[in-house]
Amino acid sequence: MSFRFLTVCCLLIFPLLTVTDVADAAEAKTRILMLTQSKGYTHGSVKRGKEQLSPSEIAMIQLGKQSGLFTVDCTQDAAADFTKENLQNYDIVMFYTTGILPIKEEDMQYFLNDWLKQKGHGFIGFHSATDTYKSYEPYWDMIGGSFNGHPWNAGNTVTITVHNTDFPAMKPFGKEFQIKDEIYQYKNWQPEKVHVLMSLNMEKCNPKRPYQVPVAWAKDWGQGKVFVNNMGHNPSTWTNPAFQDSVIGAIKWIRGDAPAAVPVNPELSKQEDAKAAAAVKAAEKK
């Protein structure tokens, strides 16, 4: 189903969004293409009803209206909508996806090597965006890592430490917070290429693992920007005010409204590895 059809559907399904609302939102500078196609596991947050958008799509459309910063076109048809031609209509691309998507190689190469490196453009990856193209190095080199299991399941409450509370997308969380959500661990993880923003506090999480588990990070990609947040498995996360404010912060960062440097910080990851290993040893002695 294409985004063009979904724009009309939104008017029919969600009474809060009127024709006037859409016209006003269209004046916003930032245009977002949100891809929620699944070629693997389909998460509840991107699962649509028969004639209804998914929880994450609804949340993003409503956030766009409420903030006045952006408009969102939602699609689960990458073959039709993730093309060189259609990307010209957007400033930010969001992925909540799984598996190998039906995107032509030339379109993906254009996205990674040209479109995304342009000033004012950005990529935001939610949760299973890292469970996408896991064997395709150009993609996981861009996004920062690949899904490698989730010992912390949807019913787990985890404690997360925020390492950079000044970053626009981290301010809503404070220095530490708890949330019930599924958290991934990673392979192809490249701490030397990213600015880690928050990680699991392994001392306060169960199960424990003797290594860092990053939860969000950011990086420059040419003149463009990349932001990844592992959270979003549970539909309830998309109605969490702090999570919603974090998304707004990330968009403002990409827009340039909230400038923030994202120097790589691999030393932080080494420190977190050591803390996690110590937490596991301490737990084993009890």
Image (cartoon, grey):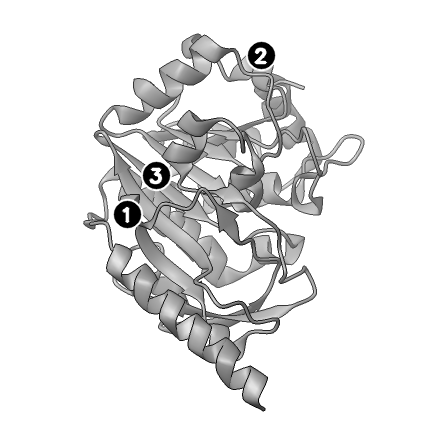
Q: Badge 3: how crowded within 10 Å, few (<14), some, or many (20+)? A: many
Q: Indicate which label's residue lies in the foreground, 1 or 3.
A: 1
Residue for badge 1: 192
Tell me which numbered mark, 3 or 2, is placed earlier along the sequence.
2
Residue for badge 3: 226
In the displayed structure, would residue 10 be above or below residue 105?
below
Going by the numbered disc 2, the residue's amino acid type is Ala
Q: In the figure, is residue 277 to the left or right of 168?
A: right
State the residue lying farthest toward the bottom: 286
Q: Badge 1: how crowded within 10 Å, few (<14), some, or many (20+)? A: some
Residue shown at the point (60%, 73%) measured from the top left? 206
Going by the numbered disc 1, the residue's amino acid type is Glu
Numbered disc 2: secondary structure: helix
Q: Measure the alpha-carbon separation of dots 3 and 2.
A: 23 Å
Q: Indicate which label's residue lies in the foreground, 3 or 2.
A: 3
Q: Nearer the viewer, residue 149 or 180?
A: 149
- The image quadrant that residue 245 belongs to is bottom left
Numbered disc 3: secondary structure: strand
Residue shown at the point (56%, 70%) measured from the top left? 158
Q: In the figure, is residue 276 to the left or right of 237?
A: left
Residue 87 visible, this angle: no
Residue for badge 2: 80
Q: Measure the alpha-carbon separation of dots 1 and 3.
A: 15 Å
In the displayed structure, would residue 88 be above or below residue 6?
above
Tell me which numbered mark, 1 or 3, is placed earlier along the sequence.
1
